Amino acid sequence: MLLLDQNISRRLVRELEGAFPGLSHVYLVGLHTASDDAVWQYARDHGFMIVTQDSDYHERSLLRGYPPKIIWIRTGNTSTQNLIHLLTEHRDDIFSFAQDESLGCLEIY
């Protein structure tokens, strides 16, 4: 399951929920104003991978390990449509990453 961080539009949930069952957004789970620590703990407790454009989660995973796993979108500022394209284009990579216990961060460019 993917949890979109606050730096990604919550409109992506509607666009991507068919491709990614269980997809959610921090806004939808009441964490849109929460600290990164709270989002991290929620993702860990509920089996989510965090999808973010923020390097902080990757750095946190280096210190704390995983879960949760991190999907780090490394495009900088980009359109919602481009994010939809990137995530759907890398859908198979994301599902493989979810199953690989040796990896904690997937970087998507």
Image: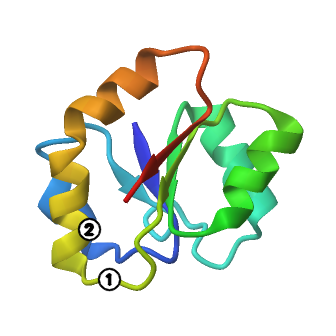
Does the rendering let one see residue 17?
no
Q: How many marks?
A: 2
Is residue 68 found left or right of 8 in the rendered image? right
In three-dimensional space, the C-alpha distance between marks 1 and 2, rounded to whole angstroms, equals 7 Å
Say which residue label 1 marks: 78
For badge 2, the amino acid type reads: Leu
Please tell me whether residue 108 is drawn above or below residue 104 in the rendered image. Answer: below
Please tell me whether residue 42 is drawn above or below residue 34 in the rendered image. Answer: above
Please tell me whether residue 39 is drawn above or below residue 31 in the rendered image. Answer: above
Is residue 71 found left or right of 21 in the rendered image? right
> At which x and y percent is residue 72?
51, 55
> At which x and y percent is residue 73?
44, 61
Say which residue label 2 marks: 83
Q: Residue at x 19, y 64 (%)?
A: 84
The image quadrant where one finds the C terminus is: bottom left
Q: Residue at x 14, y 42 (%)?
A: 19
> At which x and y percent is residue 18?
11, 44
Q: Secondary structure at mark 2?
A: helix
Question: Which quadrant holds residue 30?
Answer: bottom right
| Labels 1 and 2 touching (C-beta < 8 A) | yes
For badge 1, the amino acid type reads: Thr
